[in-house]
Amino acid sequence: MFQSSVCSYPKRGHYGDNRYRGNCSGLIVKDFFESFMTRPDGLVADPSVGGGTSADVAKEMGIRFVGTDLHQGFNLLRDDLGTFLNEEAHLVWWHPPYWSMIEYSGNQWGTAPNKWDMSRMDLQDFVEALEVAVMNIHDAVEPGGHYGILMGNMRRKGEYYNLSSLVERIAPGKLVDELIKTQHNCVSDSRQYRGRVIRIAHEKLLVFRRNKATALAFLLTVQKRAQAMVSVTWKAAVRRALQGKTLPLAEIYQAMAPFAATRGNQHWQAKVRQCLQDERYFERVETGVYALAS
C-alpha cells in the first residue's frame, strides 16, 4: 500500500515476463490494488497486459481479474472495454506505451507493425489514440471506481514531451492521487549525452475516480465529459461513440449532440460527416451507416 506520494522499487519483483521491455515493477501494481480496491469481490482489469505483470499480481492476491492486450486480439481503440468485460470494473490498471519510446508490434510481439499499436504512431495520432483509450477505460469503470494510468515522459532530439501531463488533461475522471515513481535500471542510464541534459528518472501514476453522476446513459456520459474536457478532438469523440457499435448517421448525431453543444459550432453535423470520411478510422457499412475501421 502506498505510504506517500513518492515511491521507489529498485527490484521489479517476480511478476510478469522480465524479457518484455517496458514492463514496470509488479510492486507498484500491488500497491495500487491494495490502496484503491475497496470491494474484495470487485473486478480488476488491465486492457494492455503486456508481459503479464498485473495478471501475476492479481493471481497472487486472489483478485478477480481480466487482462487482455492488442497482441491477444483486443483493440482498446476499436473495441468497447465495458462490453468485453461484461460487467463494470471496480478498478482498472493501464500502463500504455510512452509514445514511441519502445516499439511493441513487430518487436516485442508479432512479426510486423500493427496500425493500432500506439507505439507505432506519429505524435498527433498518438495523442488522439490516448484520448480514445482513456474515454473507453473511464466508461468501463463502475461509478465510484478508480483507474490508474502509469505514464512516463520522454525527450527526443532535444524536445521534452510531458506525456503524463497530457494524460491528466484528457482524462474525464476526477484526479484523486498522483504518485511519483522513481525509475531504476533504464536503458538510457548507460547512454552518454552531449550538453547539460537532465536525465528523466521518474514516471507518474495518475489515479482517477469515475464520478457517480456519469453512471447514466452514454449520452449523459458524453455530456459530462465534454463539459469537463473541451480539448478532446472531434475525431476522438466520434471514434468513442462508435466503439463496439455500428450506427446510422442519425444515431451518431444523437450521441454527438451534447459534445457539439460545448464547442459552439453551428455546423457540427458537417464536422461529424467530415470525420467519418477518414478511412483510417471509419468505414461505411452501407449508405448512411458507419462503424470503426477494422
Image (cartoon, rainbow, N blue to C red):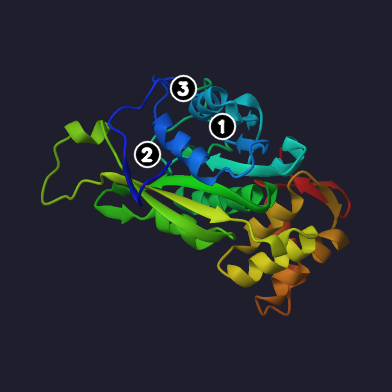
Helix, strand or loop at label 1? It is loop
Residue annotated with mark 3 = 16
Q: Residue at x 49, y 54 (%)?
A: 124
Q: Is 144 located above or below residue 261 in the figure?
A: above
The answer to whether residue 74 is left or right of residue 108 is right
Q: Amino acid at mark 3?
A: Gly
Q: CA distance from mark 3 to mark 2?
A: 20 Å
**In the rendering, at what x and y percent does residue 33 appear?**
52, 39
- The answer to whether any part of residue 49 appears in the image is yes
The answer to whether 249 appears left or right of 13 in the picture is right
Element assignment for label 2: loop
Q: Seen in the image, is 170 located left or right of residue 186? A: right
Seen at 53% across and 23% down, the residue is 60
Of the residues tagged 2 and 1, which is closer to the observer?
2
The residue that disc 1 covers is 114
Disc 2 marks which residue? 101
